[in-house]
Image (tube, helix red, strand yellow):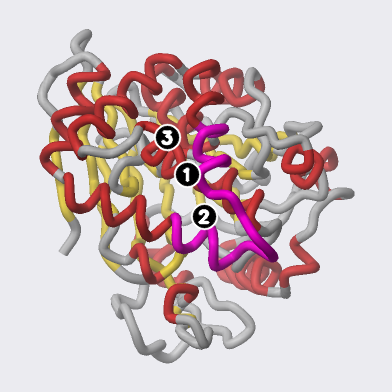
């Protein structure tokens, strides 16, 4: 069963302290698990503390309000601020430890000609983080409200705000990422960009402008949808971004390779296996030519267990249990109702054994 938490109406630092105190053990376990993951994934010796300090310095410089909230979480949980900063920059630090990684996350946005937008995502990640997440409601003092599915200590991931804007994420891999790592740089952390959009955006256009305004060091696509029928996916990478729009039927399908002209030449997905192509081709085959009118149509297409890399993932085959990988949650985002329907496990409802695909 997933955890739900609603913060009190507080300024950023105090809100962070409240969450850190409430989930002291969970935040501590998230920090320690990521430290072990960073070390396990590195190709050689890897200074986790150095990269955590770099993450903290970058966040303080680029996102001071978020730095205050992170510092509050750290204070409440009894941890150094750099350790919670590392959780918020875990995508960037993982790229520094070892470029590339397992295929993860499939996203579908549908804009039917009649009816509200449909947005569904699988969140695929390390099984070690299987109990390390929550659904968090963040009311701001000025009346804004953010709802997000995120990891303990991380300010946001997948989410929706009270103005009807939703955000979904898919990891990408680009050859430009290595240059930032070589310089020892951490750009604007992509999970904090998600939170910034959820905090501020009133439309897809606002969200795209926010994404274009930052420089990242780890490639990611952020897909935005709003209650007015807008949708776009921004592919962030050093040298980017690129923007992908829904097709003529109102369908936008994302996995883990670049689709924009700007990003394709540097895409490294092919070096990591065929999973991203298999998943996207399956979803397109199931959904092209019509815009699904409800999430159940999308979820039915996502009940897919191809041994080369299904949308519904149950990959426990690695020799090291720390590196087991599966679908941790399936999220249905409704920008009109401003809600998240979060289901633990994959679209098939199983945490362990794959069913018939």
Give percent across and percent down for residue 136.
23, 40
Placement of 23 over or under 320, stated as above or below = above
Where residue 168 is drawn, which disc sits there? Answer: 1
Residue 47 is one of the magenta-drawn residues? yes
Name of the residue lying farthest toward the right? 265
Marked residue nearer the N-terminal end (3 or 2): 3
Give percent across and percent down for residue 53.
51, 34
The range drawn in magenta is: 35-55
**202 relative to 271 in the view: left or right:** left
Please say if the residues under marks 3 and 2 sit with CB atoms less than 8 Å apart.
no
**228 relative to 148 in the view: left or right:** right
Marked residue nearer the N-terminal end (2 or 1): 2
Please say if the residues under marks 2 and 1 sit with CB atoms less than 8 Å apart.
yes
Give percent across and percent down for residue 55.
53, 33
Splitting the image into 4 quarters, where does residue 233 fall? top right
Splitting the image into 4 quarters, where does residue 314 fall? bottom left
Dot 3 corresponds to which residue? 82
Q: Identify the residue at horizontal 36%, vertical 61% (top origin).
A: 330
Where residue 107 is drawn, which disc sits there? Answer: 2
Mark nearest the camera among 3 and 2 is 3
């Amino acid at each position: 069963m997933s955890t739900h938490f609603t913060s009190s109406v507080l300024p950023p630092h105090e809100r962070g302290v409240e969450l850190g105190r409430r989930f002291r053990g969970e935040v501590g376990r998230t920090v320690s698990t990521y430290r072990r993951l960073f070390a396990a994934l590195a190709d050689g010796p890897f200074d986790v503390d150095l990269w955590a300090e770099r993450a903290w310095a970058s966040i303080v410089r680029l996102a001071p309000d978020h730095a205050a909230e992170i510092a509050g979480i750290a204070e409440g949980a009894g941890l150094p601020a750099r350790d919670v900063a590392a959780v918020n920059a875990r995508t960037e630090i993982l790229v520094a430890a070892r470029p590339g990684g397992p295929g993860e996350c499939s996203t579908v946005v549908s804009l039917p000609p009649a009816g509200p937008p449909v947005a569904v995502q699988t969140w695929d990640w390390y099984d070690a983080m299987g109990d390390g997440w929550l659904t968090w409601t963040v009311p701001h003092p000025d009346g804004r409200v953010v709802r997000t599915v995120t990891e303990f200590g991380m300010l946001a991931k997948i989410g929706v705000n009270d103005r009807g804007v939703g955000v979904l994420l898919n990891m990408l891999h680009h050859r430009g990422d290595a240059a930032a790592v070589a310089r020892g740089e951490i750009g604007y952390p992509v999970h904090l960009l998600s939170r910034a959009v959820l905090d501020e955006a009133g439309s897809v256009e606002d969200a795209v402008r926010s994404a274009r305004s930052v420089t990242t060091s780890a490639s990611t696509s952020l897909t935005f949808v709003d209650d007015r029928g807008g949708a776009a996916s921004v592919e962030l990478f050093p040298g980017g971004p690129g923007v992908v729009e829904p097709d003529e039927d109102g369908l936008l399908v994302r996995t883990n390779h670049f689709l924009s002209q700007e990003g394709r030449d540097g895409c490294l997905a092919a070096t990591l296996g065929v999973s991203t192509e298999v998943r996207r081709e399956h979803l397109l085959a199931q959904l092209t030519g019509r815009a699904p009118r409800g999430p159940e149509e999308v979820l039915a297409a996502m009940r897919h267990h191809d041994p080369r890399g299904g949308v519904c993932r149950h990959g426990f085959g690695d020799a090291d249990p720390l590196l087991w990988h599966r679908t941790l949650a399936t999220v249905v985002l409704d920008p009109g109702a401003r809600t998240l329907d979060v289901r633990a496990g994959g679209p098939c409802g199983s945490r362990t054994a794959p069913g018939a695909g």
